[in-house]
Image (cartoon, rainbow, N blue to C red):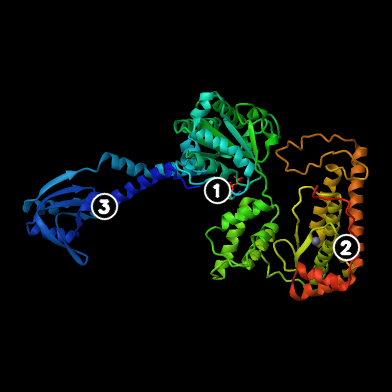
Amino acid sequence: MPTRINPWSLVIVVILAYWLFTLFGGSNNARTTVSYSDFIAYVEQGKVARVVLQEGRINGFFKAPERIQVGNTTETTDRFTVIALPPGFSDPQFTNLLRQNGVEITNRPPSMWGQLLFTLLPILLLIGFWWFFFMRSQGGAGQVMQFGQSRARQYGKEKRVNTTFKDVAGHTEAKRELMEVVDFLKNPQKYIAIGAEIPKGVLLVGPPGTGKTLLTRAVAGEAGVPFFSVSASEFMEMFVGVGASRVRTLFEEARRNAPAIIFIDELDSIGRKRGAGIGGGHDEREQTLNQILSEMDGFEKDTSVIVLAATNRPDILDPALLRPGRFDRQVVIGLPTLEERKEILQVHMRGKKFAPDVDVNNLARLTPQFSGADLKNLVNEAALQAARENATEIANIHFQTALDKIMLGLERGTLKLSEQEKRAVAYHEAGHAIAGEVLPYADKTEKVSIVPRGMALGVRWSKPEERILMSKEHLEDTLAMTLAGRAAEELFVGTITTGAANDFKQATSLAKQMVLDWGMGDHFKNVAWGSNQGPIFLGEEIAKKQDHSEETSRLIDADIQAILDRAYEKAKQVLSSNTEAMHRLAEELLESEIVQGERVREIIAQTKRPEAVAPAAFNPEI
Ligand code: ADP
Ligand code: ZN
């Protein structure tokens, strides 16, 4: 966001400048300053025609232009100033001297305004500072001055948008849907003539960073119309009513520039169901929301202003927003698929230099759950890494470093572990890796490391397959793999450590979902109680009553525990039948700190061939 200048600070600066000005010179800027003794000399030589006596200084005029020494140079001037006369200066000899030499004398009292300002200045400054800090504490200096103006006007407005659909990778369906909006903005007459109603609002639904803003900009760019963007949370201000009036100016401005696009980001921050959530209604929010609704209703049939809004929680939006004539169209912008991740990477790799070993397909495979913004960040981190090493092109190793850094935080080279702790970590991670390899439905290992990073002492990266559906077998093997760290400690280290805390958290939440959402508990085959795994949004879920009995709760807990226990037993069983591989892998980890997935598979193959246990019970490709 560009910095705004607080108008009050401007006022203060001007006052301050004036004050300094009157203090140290005033109107003498065009004059040359001479010393008092030089001045007397000039008077005695009869060169001075006229003086104006003012508080603190004498402004003088020569009879004819005079060369005066100023520092190292000389200046020719017909006027000069003598400053630093003591206040109330009155030397009768001085006046006589002037008179004798025929100098015309004018007395000028200091200006009223100047004097007033001079005395009031400290008070003004005090008030100014007080105001400044008051405003600041109220949430941002300067906002108060722009009261009802929409922020979009100052920040979001772009007359010419250069983004096109080409800059947006993937999202094929969304683009097709939005092409219609583009077409309407370009040829409204076509639609009006046939009496077709045009959507006024389109809701883009999806997690952050998936390109909702980008798509909207592309719509504006394709249609060649101005783009007004504002984040709904910016409507919320310190004074009630400001949000509503901001909405009004935003829509007015857009209408004046029609055809145009308004983009409202984070619509859910004001568009939440009225009366829902903790803390009751928020007047400001409701007024702002109502204003948006009435603005959208107030569009003439032929006003070609289209409102696009983004949210990742459509379920909590006020139904009034979703009624026909408002945001009646929803376009889902999900996390990119494998293919889309590849395209997005390619978009952001455009115009950069890459070594031949950079494999986009592999990068896409290594980045499940990455949003478009994350992928953009990955490419940039890799480029930064390459620059840091003074490389001429970005290579695979830079991508690997960037990936590790993004997913796990920086390496913590300073963290010193004891030999014993290192051993525990090595066996823990080896446990994850071996279990992941041996269990048929778990994700395979990309690499294992015992270099402490971020919050973790060791890490096992998996190479997840692209899955839309998750089978029960996959979930169970994933749980076993997750708990294999602790199992390895128990079997090989002789003690258990706190290093498994995060594993338990993940495993428990997965088991909970299996029971509550996916009907995979022993007692709950065909029922979903809902695990409330989603983000809690301001009490909506908290307020939701638990709708099952205590007996059910008890059974749920028992089921979750049973699933976890079985997974742990499975992990222990897998590891104890691969003891040799465990020792080898742990040794190699202690020696070289990082072991690649390939090597893990080699070790397993060398030590023992696990019997093929792959009943083809579930085919995820159906
Ligand atoms: P959102 O509005 O959904 O939070 P943005 O549109 O702000 O996400 O996306 C952030 C950045 O991520 C974009 O500026 C763009 O560089 C990149 N990005 C996201 N999705 C894509 C995509 N599908 N294709 C290309 N770049 C993308
Ligand atoms: Zn672990």
Residue under label 3, please give it: 25
The label shown at residue 286 is: none
Earlier in the chain: of badge 1 and badge 2, it is 1
Instruction: Decide: few, some or many residues near mark 3? Use Cα within 10 Å; few <14, some 14-19, many ≥20.
Output: some
Q: Is mark 3 within 8 Å of ligand 1?
A: no
For the point 8% across and 58% down, the residue is 44
Q: Are marks 2 and 3 in contact (CB under 8 Å)?
A: no
State the residue in front, 70 or 216: 216
- Give percent across and percent down for residue 285: 61, 32
What's the distance in space between the residues labelled 1 and 2, CA to CA? 50 Å
Earlier in the chain: of badge 2 and badge 3, it is 3
Instruction: Decide: few, some or many residues near mark 1? Use Cα within 10 Å; few <14, some 14-19, many ≥20.
Output: few
The quadrant in which residue 591 appears is bottom right
State the residue in front, 320 or 327: 327
Instruction: Assign a secondary structure to mark 3.
Output: loop
Q: Is mark 2 within 8 Å of ligand 2?
A: no
Residue under label 1, please give it: 166
Amino acid type, residue under disc 3 in the picture: Gly
**18 on left or right of 51:** right
Residue farthest bottom in this picture? 591
The label shown at residue 487 is: 2
State the residue in front, 396 or 307: 396
What's the distance in space between the residues labelled 2 and 3, CA to CA? 83 Å
- Count of all numbered marks drawn on residues in the image: 3
Earlier in the chain: of badge 1 and badge 3, it is 3
- Residue 103, compared with residue 381, is above or below; it is above
For the point 54% across and 71% down, the residue is 390
